[in-house]
Amino acid sequence: MSESDTTHLKPSSAEQNAGSAPYTPFLLRLYDFWVLGVSNHFAWQCSTTKVQLPLFKATIGTRHLDVGVGTGYYPAKTVETETPCKEITLVDLNPNTLNQAAARINEAQKSIKVNTVVANIYEPLPLPAGEKFDSISTFYLLHCLAGPPESKTKVFDVLKTYVADDGVFVGTTILGEERPMNFFASRLMKIYNEKGIFDNWQDSKAVFEEGLRRNFDEVDIQIIGRSMVWTARRPKKEA
């Protein structure tokens, strides 16, 4: 991909890498069917096509940053039709996901510049000083991160600095035990947490909302099924 640039940053620990490590090229071929289709509909009950994709489409700006990229489904589906987006920067710990997502976006819309960055989201990103984006997304990232929910709000602290003054930060995540679970969701949560793919038993709306409001003046949160869906604007200035 001649238009793609890649920057590599070594992950700080194997634990932080656990949530992204399972996404091999083989498993990524099943991701859309299993995660975005079966799991979102039957377990997490937060529709890909009725909730998450419309949110992505409605908020993408000219310069977009997507963190925790999966297969690139959301940006690729968004840019295959008319879009204001001209450049997308993809950030993930797993080069497999970055390569697939970048290829998928370029196939959907060849005119868009795609940059890929291997990085640890708990640390400042290896981007040019003062870099700002019109829109930032983190779809289904937080529940894959290791550690208590309080530590995960560091993601909001980091990403706030890259949101333009008139930009927007959107995301979704699967919450922990505070949300009711059907049998299918219960089984998946147990299996994924035991394997380290998820670490979200304690993840709560209250903790994540505090983290978002600490960083943004305007925050809207919805709970849909087992998922928290947010839109945040007006990043707060550093004291």
Image (tube, rainbow, N blue to C red):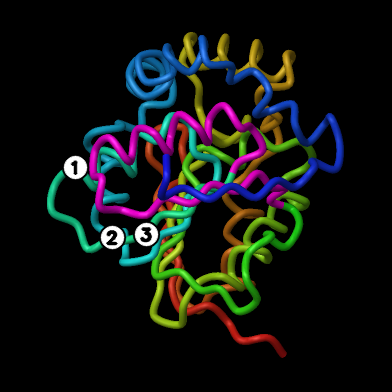
Question: For residue 87, which numbered disc appears in the image?
Answer: 3
Q: Is residue 201 above or below residue 212?
A: above
The amino acid on which the numbered mark 3 sits, given as a three-letter code, is: Glu
Residue tagged 1: 80
Q: Residues within 10 Å of mark 3 (few under 14, many from 20)?
A: some
Q: Is residue 190 magenta?
A: no
Contact, mark 1 vs mark 3 (Cβ under 8 Å): no
Q: Tag 3 or tag 1, which sits nearer the N-term?
A: 1
Local SS, label 3: strand
Query: Which residue in the rendered view is the most extreme toward the left?
Result: 82
Residue tagged 2: 85
Quarter of the image where the N terminus is located:
top left
Contact, mark 1 vs mark 2 (Cβ under 8 Å): no
Magenta residue span: 92-121
The amino acid on which the numbered mark 1 sits, given as a three-letter code, is: Glu
Contact, mark 2 vs mark 3 (Cβ under 8 Å): yes
Local SS, label 2: loop
Of the pair 174 and 182, the residue shown nearer to us: 174
Q: Is residue 117 magenta?
A: yes
Residue 202: percent from left, percent from top:
71, 36
Q: Residues within 10 Å of mark 1 (few under 14, many from 20)?
A: some
Residue 60: percent from left, percent from top:
31, 59
Residue 201: percent from left, percent from top:
69, 30
Please tell me which residue is depicted at 36% across the width and 27% down the height of the picture. 45
